[in-house]
Image: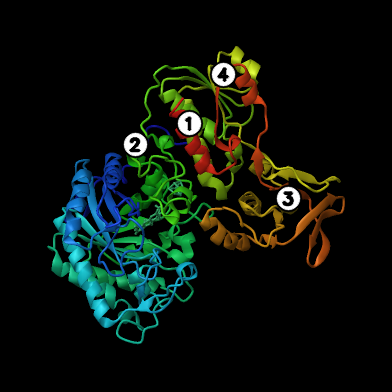
Amino acid sequence: MIGVDVTFPALFSPGRIGPVEIRNRVLKSPQSTATSNPDGTVTQRTVNHYRRLGEGGVGLVMLEYSHVDDDASKAIHNQLGNSRREHVAGLGWVADEVHSTGAKVGLQIAHGGRQKFLGTAPIKSATDSSWSDIEDQYGVVPTPMTIDEIDGVVTAFGQAAARAHAARFDIVEVHAGHGYLITNFLSPHTNWRDDEYGGSFENRARLLLRIVDEIRASVPRAFPLSIRLSVSDYEPDGIPIDETVTLARLLEEHGVDVLHCSGGHHAGLEWEVSPWYQVRTPHRWGWEAIKAAVTIPVIASGSIVDPETAEDIVASGSADFVSLGRPMLADPDWVAKAQSGRVLEITPCIRCNDGCLHRGLNQGRSAGCSVNPSVTEEGRFPIELAPSPREVAVVGGGPAGLKAAAILHDRGHTVTIHEPGELGGALAHANGFEVKRDLSALVRHLVHEVARRGITVVPEFATAESLCAGGAETVVIATGAVPRKPHFPISGEHRILHAGDVRSVDVPRGDVVVIGGGLQGCEAALRLAETGSAKVTIVEQGPRILANDEVFTDRERLPLFLDAASVEIRTAAAVTAIDEAGVHVRSDAGEDVLNANTVVLALGRANDESRLAADLRDRGVAVSVIGSAERPGRVFDAIHSAFFTARQV
Ligand SMILES: Cc1cc2nc3c(=O)[nH]c(=O)nc-3n(C[C@H](O)[C@H](O)[C@H](O)COP(=O)(O)O)c2cc1C
Ligand code: SF4
């Protein structure tokens, strides 16, 4: 475990991009907050968000993508605008506020291309290559850009860069990755034009190089230019790394000052915004190939979650800077905490894509975060001392209970946690599994936050009597949910486990049948498959797995990982019984029996119908029920309900 003397010397040494000195090697990755006004002008929320990031100690805050024209470049609701001179005042307001924190600040400029999430015509791209998500939802397909339109976009990028300079930014970054317009031209996956912008690599790179030349002609040479690239779009017919390396060399020759290396596009989000079941730093191989080919600095990006990895990247020369997106939505003080050796105090991003994307941008909201309810609402929900501090008992040591206890303590209450089992609650199963390392990190953090505050943990089952006898004036019930009961008969000698009881210390071996193809069943199957000692089959009675309100990246991409892990999936198959013979399954094809050394039940979770709350209320004790004890949910629900309840007690 990391001690308090860790300082990460390479990470926190100053760096330089062009003539701009940066106080350390950490960037905030550009991330759409969708906090601007509909006309693209910034709001107080935009300013608060970026200033807060600067206050957290990051070296350079790269603002989210801003649209460069009022034609087809705007991709998303409430996007930051940089298409008109009247945007400059607000952009300068953000730049000044970030500068006041000692951080440098950059602005990303972009054209949405075929990934115009708004779904409104016109959608413009290299060709009519459509992204199915938008076509299916809105029925709009891209129109191939004419030469005049291409000329217009080149001019628009130049003017947008000049506005960034006028607004006192330290650097401007062109978004040439992630499947937006410039990638649509770069990638053979989406570009089959037969003019001077399609076909050969030279032709596909022409748009980007023209944009670079236009920007260089529009701003002083001392104003650094960054290009954000996908090292590859990871499509079989897409951008190969040798083309990206050649492109990187050309960009350096054309006067680019730094290359910001990401990967993937929206049709393959397991690369672009890699979820918990994807490896960390998935693009390392790519940025290292680029770093070896250029002399300008390289920024590494994507799932750099912890300071140890970030330090290793910079110290080993793998890249010159690291950029963190979601980890800084999760904790804007990531840098300050890492720099002072308080690593376990960092609230880790769990790579769930729930708050930021699934319930955030994807639902037309601003970006949020499962583990940080204050993101894009900075300053709105302060933790203040309670007017009359009380004895508060928190019953349950899962994520909701641990989070609530820490906040209640900070508000001046005297807090005890009552937990007869393991701290971590429904997340305790994550411990020891590689595929669940992000959740394990969250549990470690939450437990650390309770421990460093000296909060007493009573390792006993709490009753209304014991809590009242202990002097509790207020009780927060965070006992979690209980597994749903099976609706089929069970007999025989099989080992039967609930999904949450599959632990790394005693992993089932041989034939394992997981009943239930929701998130619980799928993640249990991945954990089992990781050990290499179990042959796993998921049985799901519905027509497909992950068919409920799972996070969209899980719904769309997790099946690929189950497939890669050789997990067999039986859908439209209802379990009718478990007996000596095995697991009886009925489907349209008839009835068959699956061998099973172990059966894992993943039938969902229900509210705990314990009488604790009612008994306490009968005794006149103030009670709040939070997390899955109130309504079964995900980490987002647990942390948010804990946060908002604990602020009120
Ligand atoms: C909510 C959200 C918004 C994003 N917006 C942008 C953006 O405006 N420009 C960009 O280049 N990348 C954007 N990205 C991608 C991130 O910059 C980053 O590459 C990605 O999240 C993976 O890095 P991370 O693991 O550090 O978060 C966005 C990602 C998320 C989750
Ligand atoms: S919502 Fe999840 S993935 Fe997004 S920043 Fe927060 S913890 Fe990370």
Q: Pointer 1: what residue? A: 645
Residue 341, picture quadrant: top left
Disc 4 or 1, which lies upstream in sequence? 4
Residue 314 at x, y percent in the picture:
34, 51
> What is the spatial separation of the Cα atoms under label 4 and label 2, in whole angstroms?
30 Å
Residue at the spot x=62%, y=59% of the render?
562
Disc 3 or 4, which lies upstream in sequence? 3
Q: Pointer 2: what residue? A: 380
Residue 537 at x, y percent in the picture:
71, 57
Amino acid residing under circle 2: Arg
In the depicted view, which residue is nearer to us: 388 or 456? 388
Disc 1 or 2, which lies upstream in sequence? 2
The secondary structure type at the circle numbered 2 is loop
> What is the spatial separation of the Cα atoms under label 1 and label 2, in whole angstroms?
15 Å
Q: Label 4: how many residues lie within 10 Å, few (<14), some (14-19) or many (20+)? A: some
Ligand 2: does it lie within 8 Å of the C-beta at label 2?
no
Q: Pointer 4: what residue? A: 621
Residue 49 at x, y percent in the picture:
31, 44
Rendered position, 629 above or below 591: above
Quarter of the displayed picture in which ligand 1 can be seen: bottom left
Ligand 2: does it lie within 8 Å of the C-beta at label 4?
no
Disc 2 or 3, which lies upstream in sequence? 2
Q: How is the image coloured?
A: rainbow
Rendered position, 473 above or below 13: above
Q: Pointer 3: what residue? A: 509
Residue 260, picture quadrant: bottom left
Q: Label 3: how many residues lie within 10 Å, few (<14), some (14-19) or many (20+)? A: some
The secondary structure type at the circle numbered 1 is helix
Q: Are marks 4 and 2 in contact (CB under 8 Å)?
A: no
Camera-nearest label, 2 or 3: 2
